[in-house]
Amino acid sequence: MRNIVEPQEAFPYKPPSELIRQKYRHIFLITTPLQPRLFKTLFDKVVATFLLLLSLPILLLLKLAFLIEGWLVPENKGPMFFFYNAVSAGKIIPKYKIRLIKLKYIEPEGAKRGDWVAYSAEWTPDSRTYVGKFVKKFYLDELPQFYSILKGDMSIVGPRPLAILHYERDLAQGNVTRKLLKGGILGLGHINKGTSEMGNPQFEYEYVDQYLKKSSWGLLMLDLWIIWKGALVIIKGGGH
């Protein structure tokens, strides 16, 4: 088995400060996942269906690019999709993604088990394929997760679902947000990617707090604002 060192980039989340614990004391008292909200759920289903259909031409072009690159550079060939086990609202789910790295950087036994560590060489220099570099830059590797949203495993907006080992670490250091809410493609914290605020748990607790306080319609309006901010990050090519 290849000895893969976990990169720091894989887990930038910080423990809750005493200020967070005091301000959001009511959140730490919740022990079960929060109930779905009507408009948020309907919006997720409709948008996931629409975007899956809209992304089909993109996925077909990417598949063609994968095949061409694999033909020109044999070491870069391999399946386009993969998954590892992650946690969403305290439940283990398959987190689907588009493969970014060469097969030689993937630990095969771990991949069979759905372990995130098998794919953790993503940050190793030269590990990514040419198509993988482009895919990551514009977050296209997240497209398969709209299928997870359609299934009900995820939401468009919510805390990012973490691999099991990262979820357990996050829980052990005192964070509870990912135990309460479905994981999302975008979140209040994620739209700060690339800034010093990335990984600040304040944003995740603020979102849970708003989830509890806002009406179903008000929560949808907040989600739309987060989606708009996230779209600006994607357009700028902020993936890395």
Image: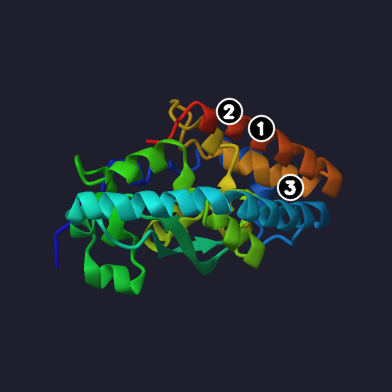
From this view, report whether residue 141 is shown above or below residue 119.
above
Q: Which residue is mark 2?
A: 232
Q: Is residue 172 visible?
A: no
Q: Residues within 10 Å of mark 3 (few under 14, many from 20)?
A: many
In the image, 127 versus 2, the foreground residue is 127
* Sequence-earlier tag: 1 or 3: 3
Left or right: where 237 falls relative to 130: right
Which quarter of the rendered picture does the C terminus lie within? top left
Tell me which amino acid carries mark 1.
Trp
Tell me which amino acid carries mark 2.
Leu
Left or right: where 157 falls relative to 142: right
* Sequence-earlier tag: 2 or 3: 3
Marker disc for residue 98: none
In the image, 115 versus 56, the foreground residue is 56
How far apart marks 1 and 3 lie (CA) works out to 18 Å
For label 1, the SS is helix
Q: CB atoms at circles 2 and 1 under 8 Å apart?
A: yes
Residue visible at 43% across and 26% down?
A: 196
In percent of width and height, residue 207 lies at 66, 42
Q: Which residue is mark 3?
A: 211
Quadrant of res 169: bottom left
Q: Which residue is mark 1?
A: 228
